[in-house]
Image (cartoon, helix red, strand yellow):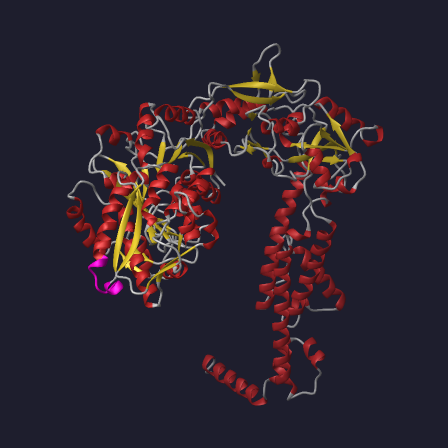
Amino acid sequence: MNMFWLLGVIFCYGIFIGTGTGVRVSTSPKVVNIGAILSFNSSIGKVAKVAIEAAVEDVNSNPAVLKGTKLKLATQDTKQSSGFLGIIEALRFMENDTVAIVGPQQSVMAHVISHIANELQVPLLSFAATDPTLNSLQFPYFVRTTQSDIFQMAAVAEIISYYEWRDVIAIYIDDDHGRNGVAALGDKLAEKRCKISYRAPLSPKVGGNEISDILLKVALMESRVIILHIYATWGLDVVDVARNMGMMESGYVWIATDWLSTVLDTESSLPPTAMDGIQGVLTLRMHTPDSKLKRKFVSRWSNLTGGVFGLNTYGLYAYDTVWLLAHALDAFLNQGGNISFSNDSRLTEFHGGNLHFDSMSIFDGGNMLLTSILEVNISGVSGPIKFTSDGNLIGTAYEVINVIGTTGMRRIGYWSNSFGLSTVPPEELNAKINRSRSNHLYGVIWPGQTTIKPRGWVFSSNGKQLRVGVPVRISFREFATRVEGSDVFHGYCIDVFNAAIALLPYAVPYKFIPFGDGHRVPIYDNLLHMITTNEFDAVVGDITITTNRTKIVDFTQPYIESGLVVVAPVQKLNSSAWAFLRPFTPMMWFVTGLFFLAVGVVVWILERRTNDDFQGPPKKQVATIVWFSFSTLFTAHREKIDSALGRLVLLIWLFVVLILNSSYIASLTSILTVEQLSYSVKGIESLIISDDPIGYQSGSFTENYLMEELNIQKSRLVPLDSAEEFEKALNDGPNKGGVAAVVDKRAYMELFLSSRCEFGIVGQEFTKMGWGFAFPRESLLALDMSTAILKLSENGELQKIHDKWLSRQACSSEGAKQDVDRLPLKSFWGLFLLCGVACFVALILYVVKMVHQYTRHSGRSSQSFLSFVKEKENHVHKMEEPENSRDNRKRRKKVTNRWINPC
């Protein structure tokens, strides 16, 4: 506990003195003593003094409140002092029996006096102490009648997030008000995934030299978003020094807390230099909704002050604080509360002396009055006055102000705890049925008279070059290598980095620093770890972006895709006499032949009763089925199809045959014209289940990936350093101490295969990864470099760099050929399903037709169903035709002949 608090307790105990000992009671007081602690010459204090006095006068003249009891106000000027002497001056007026104190104005005083208020049970109603920590359980008698800085900092964080900035700098007074406010800002920014990158505290007794020193440090930082949380007394001085240092120009963002809007509302005019210094600054102002009470009070203000100074929002809250206290006292007295004070018997041993500790009085009804204060629910000039369960006022909202022009302020929107940022007042949003967070602000004119949103940061080298680590490779030097005897680096990765950094809108001095001895491949994880130890500012090279690496560094947008592939020796396949069978798998051949016969049988069933071509001896009919089925390959069958169901089945089958025929011809053509390769392994799957050794490039992440992700034993992995070692290990094979295959990134392997036709890539990439440049965590330079890489990709420059270093013509197109896949059954199961369904439906319809005909026929004959089905359909019709019908047909025929041959 600090010395100020202890001394404050001693002095305050001494001046809380009554006129005697024992208990002093006033059952029906005509006058109730209240106090006010203000700084009369400050922007807040001078306005609050007038507002409080006006409120006391209005309360005393209103018979509906307190019913004859008058408020007697005693004010104390703290003379803008936040130190120990100011606290003593503020407490002198409390020698009388005071039931409540309006104030104090400053959070530092509130912290000390709240300890005294706890002992004397006197409520403190502060309209201006905004320190969030004053709401703690440590200070039960402190009542904040204005908005807490916890909400103001939430509004600032929302603005930072809205404009997509990540880092800010906080300049603040190093006292309870400043430290606790900035701590709340840090918490709110963290919720938005933002942070305070630099804190610049100022002494409570700040001077011009200290301001210059602090701003000089701020100017060397990367962030250009500055939060100024300070007292109005020094706020304009800080801004003026910043303007003289060129920190109010284009590119900077200044966000001032509500001290600036308070100054602009209060002071009728500011010097031109002061107005010039704050152009483009954003500030906040507590939002008070429009109401009849507010308009009436605002109209009285010029009469109350004579037009000397304006009305700010703290004046509105100060006015409402008196009314709040009056309503609470009214409820307190109506509930039988007594204005009584008693001495603390524990201090009788301190009898004597000038401080009179033994005469200290305690307000007996303090706890009851505090409860009445927290239960008040009224409407004031600042809006609804009601407390939440945590002691804050309801309806928290701020106006977002853009300082511009000679008029000073232009409102660009609102922030509320319920709706976030909006261009509509929160009370209007609250009245709507469909309420949602619009998160929108009007346009801003920023410092430097620009409407373009500042980027919010610059690259700040502090006169130093960016230290860029580059791995010294002993193979695949096309990616990055150092020129012998110099500090010059070149290669694909180097050229991409140089091209990207040239597109940045600011200059970045940098130098490449080699990493590695040049004899073995360096371990890339160790290289990246040097960024975290501040040995490197960036790393450029063939650095693969992996999940574990992103936990320690930030990567740019990938500038090349390079997943892992398997490379193995290949052999050419000689053509065989049975090559025509290779397009289809054995299962595909079996199912295709089965369907040929099945369709022939279905068509025979549908046609045999009506079509003479499908009739005859059993041997002939079997031959007809086989011939008809396979002749559909050439659409040259001699049999005609008469039935509609048969034609439907044949149409669908011919479509299936067309697809099969086309696929077979295309695959066979590929087999006979494209060189086929045979691999000792078939892909990563076959490597996993085998026991053969696997080669990988030493120093890369491949080893960990194969062990951790694919569960391959470390004993099977063979580290290789160069392309020559790759080649020797693959040629030797597992039987001679080599490897069955090499697993590495595609970019390396394409270069490796460009001059080695005896190897090839087996299967597809089994990971999707990319390479990026590495920077420290939360680096803003990484974001701009990512944007630059995207621009290189869009304008084609990235492809040109790729073609310059990585395009090879020799065997790159042949060495990576894959086995031509045989056509499996799963590629055509839909066609076979369609044909099968058509055959099944046709047979069902045919059976239904047969049953129907048999039912009609069975009434005239005792013939069985099977013998009925075997008969020809025209024979059945003749048997079913009645005798009368045949006689009538003969008679019609004779008549017709008579007309034709009358003689």
Residue 606 picture quarter: bottom right
In-front residue for pair 756/299: 299
- The residue that appears at 21% across and 61% down in the rendered structure is 62
Q: Residue furthest front?
A: 352
Q: Is residue 279 left or right of residue 468?
A: left
Q: Is residue 689 magenta?
A: no
Residue 691, position in %: x, y?
Answer: 81, 38
In-front residue for pair 224/818: 224
Q: Is residue 144 left or right of residue 861?
A: left
In-front residue for pair 491/624: 491
Q: Is residue 874 left or right of residue 285?
A: right
In the rendered structure, which segment of residues is drawn in magenta?
A: 59-68
In the image, residue 209 sits, relative to residue 701, either above or below, namely above
In the image, residue 372 sits, relative to residue 852, either above or below, namely above
Residue 875, position in %: x, y?
Answer: 64, 79
- The residue that appears at 64% across and 44% down in the rendered structure is 665
Residue 734, position in %: x, y?
Answer: 82, 32
In the image, residue 190 sits, relative to residue 568, either above or below, namely below
Question: Can the viewer see residue 237?
Answer: yes
Q: Residue furthest right?
A: 735
Report the label total: 0
- The residue that appears at 61% across and 68% down in the rendered structure is 841
Residue 130 picture quarter: top left
Residue 257, position in %: x, y?
Answer: 35, 40
In-front residue for pair 296/320: 320
Question: Can the viewer see residue 611?
Answer: no
